[in-house]
Image (cartoon, helix red, strand yellow):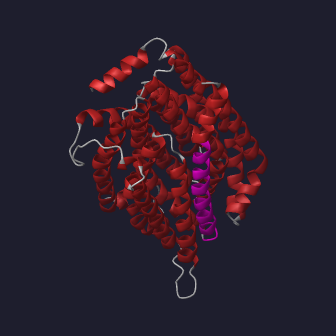
């Protein structure tokens, strides 16, 4: 396969993911901007509630990554029936866990919220938001596995269309329920929570319908196995890759809880600035975010095909493209830091604090985008635990301890917390590159390690 075809493969997968995430981000941005017109406590309360929900999202997204790798591998091997069987095994095991997560959160919500803050007014507001928004979690899990099925087949357009539908629901309902219209009362933050649940429910059920529709993938990928029967070998494949990926994501979310506690020590305005700054950063990260799925899926597909030259070319081109997207993101954050914050809130204090965060995060964009490609390739090459370990080192040996020392012990300026967050990303890419070279990940097909890996997975 020549370079032009490889580039087409990459962009065919990456562009719909970028558009999908831009759509999701736009909906979140609109909702955030609407809430940003409310009080600082409302912004902070949404941030606290989202931290809880996003921890579960990170868990199920990681399992989805594991399913994506196995589906892409089987797709490359042309084992169509195993593509469907892999995803269905994930459904049967993940959805019950998601329901238990909802129940556990409702039971232990107060102790969980106290991990963030002791401010009673903020606790009361966050409690009301979280009690509703937590019901989005099962649909988040379903959506993650649906996306794994589509992405593993190399189809990133369908998740994009689903995201478009979800975002329409979120924006329209969000506006109507937050501010009210005609006979509809203004529900404020409660309205935002309801619209979040409705949008995820719409996305999850739509994806499920499209997979099993007459022209969907699962309508012709027949395996003749009972849906609810558990296959230990398939589950082992999914979770051996999915659990480390989930842990990697959860590490970040758990660290966000610690960081939230540290930042809330500077006041609700500081925490609101952090959450709005994250939104601005995510906008600029959009061009590079597709490389997470692309690097994982395309590397796994090349390994399934046992095509060394294709595997090498995929990595080389994605590394080059991710560097350029990182440069673009950095320039945007450096140049438009003030503009982003003005767009997201009309509170001058929050704008000032957020501008500093956005500017400092500009230094983290290139290493962050490159890490997406390295992590995806390393994971698909069989080194499942490496991305998780690197994430642990960056987050829990750099980001968290530096933030706690600067914020809790030394009581330094808030900007030192932002520096700790950026430094974490730089440390992680350096470690990733060193491991990639030491383990000769680029040679996994040429030296036969990929064939042994496939043998292990087949016999698992």
- Residue 53, placed above or below residue 431: below
Q: Quadrant of residue 267?
A: bottom right
Residue 104 horizontal/vertical position (percent): 30, 57
Residue 20 horizontal/vertical position (percent): 57, 52
Task: Please identify the quadrant where the C terminus is shown.
Answer: top left
What is the residue that sits farthest to the top in this orientation? 447
Residue 361 horizontal/vertical position (percent): 67, 42
Tell which of 403 and 347 is nearer to you. Answer: 347
Residue drawn at x 52%, y 47% as measured from the top left? 259
- Side of 456 relative to 189 (left or right): left
What is the residue that sits farthest to the bottom in this orientation? 183
Q: Quadrant of residue 294?
A: top right
**Does the magenta segment cover residue 79?**
no
**Does the magenta segment cover residue 17?**
yes
The stretch of residues the image draws in magenta is 14-38
Tell which of 318 and 35 is nearer to you. Answer: 318
Task: Please identify the quadrant where the N terminus is shown.
Answer: top right
Is there any visible trace of residue 113 in the rendered image?
no
Tell which of 114 and 446 is nearer to you. Answer: 446
Q: Quadrant of residue 232?
A: top left
- Side of 33 relative to 104 (left or right): right
Residue 133 horizontal/vertical position (percent): 43, 64
Residue drawn at x 60%, y 63% as measured from the top left? 32
Residue drawn at x 20%, y 45% as measured from the top left? 229
């Amino acid at each position: 396969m020549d370079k032009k075809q490889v580039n087409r493969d990459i962009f065919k997968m990456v562009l719909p993911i970028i558009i999908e995430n831009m759509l999701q981000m736009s909906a979140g941005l609109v909702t955030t901007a609407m809430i940003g017109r409310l009080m600082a406590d409302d912004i902070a309360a949404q941030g606290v509630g989202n931290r809880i929900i996003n921890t579960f999202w990170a868990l199920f997204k990681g399992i989805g990554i594991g399913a994506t790798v196995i589906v892409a591998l089987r797709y490359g091997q042309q084992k169509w029936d195993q593509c469907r069987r892999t995803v269905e095994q994930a459904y049967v095991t993940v959805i019950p866990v998601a329901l238990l997560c909802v129940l556990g959160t409702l039971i232990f919500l107060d102790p969980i919220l106290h991990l963030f803050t002791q401010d009673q007014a903020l606790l009361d507001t966050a409690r009301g938001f979280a009690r509703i928004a937590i019901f989005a979690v099962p649909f988040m899990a379903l959506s993650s596995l649906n996306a794994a099925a589509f992405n593993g087949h190399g189809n990133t357009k369908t998740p994009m269309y689903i995201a478009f539908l979800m975002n329409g629901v979120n924006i329209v309902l969000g506006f109507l329920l937050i501010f009210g219209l005609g006979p509809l009362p203004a529900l404020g933050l409660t309205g935002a929570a309801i619209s979040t649940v409705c949008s995820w429910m719409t996305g999850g059920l739509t994806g499920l319908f499209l997979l099993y529709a007459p022209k969907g993938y699962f309508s012709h990928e027949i395996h003749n196995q009972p849906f609810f029967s558990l296959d230990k070998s398939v589950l082992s494949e999914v979770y051996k890759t999915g659990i480390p990926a989930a842990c990697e994501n959860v590490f970040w979310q758990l660290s966000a809880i610690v960081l939230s506690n540290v930042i809330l020590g500077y006041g609700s305005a500081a925490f609101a600035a952090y959450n709005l700054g994250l939104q601005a950063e995510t906008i600029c990260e959009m061009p590079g975010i597709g490389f997470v799925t692309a690097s994982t899926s395309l590397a796994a597909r090349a390994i399934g095909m046992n095509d060394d030259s294709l595997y090498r070319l995929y990595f080389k081109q994605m590394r080059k493209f991710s560097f350029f997207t990182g440069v673009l993101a950095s320039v945007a954050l450096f140049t438009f830091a003030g503009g982003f914050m003005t767009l997201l809130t009309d509170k001058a204090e929050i704008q000032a604090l957020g501008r500093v965060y956005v500017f400092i995060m500009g230094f983290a964009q290139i290493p962050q985008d490159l890490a997406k490609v390295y992590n995806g390739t390393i994971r698909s090459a069989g080194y499942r635990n490496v991305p998780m370990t690197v994430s642990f080192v960056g987050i829990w040996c750099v980001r968290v301890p530096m933030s706690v020392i600067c914020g809790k012990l030394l009581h330094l300026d808030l900007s030192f917390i932002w520096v700790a967050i950026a430094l974490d990303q730089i440390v992680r890419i350096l470690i990733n590159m060193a491991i990639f070279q030491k383990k000769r990940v680029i040679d996994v097909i040429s030296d036969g390690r990929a064939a042994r890996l496939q043998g292990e997975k087949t016999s698992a």
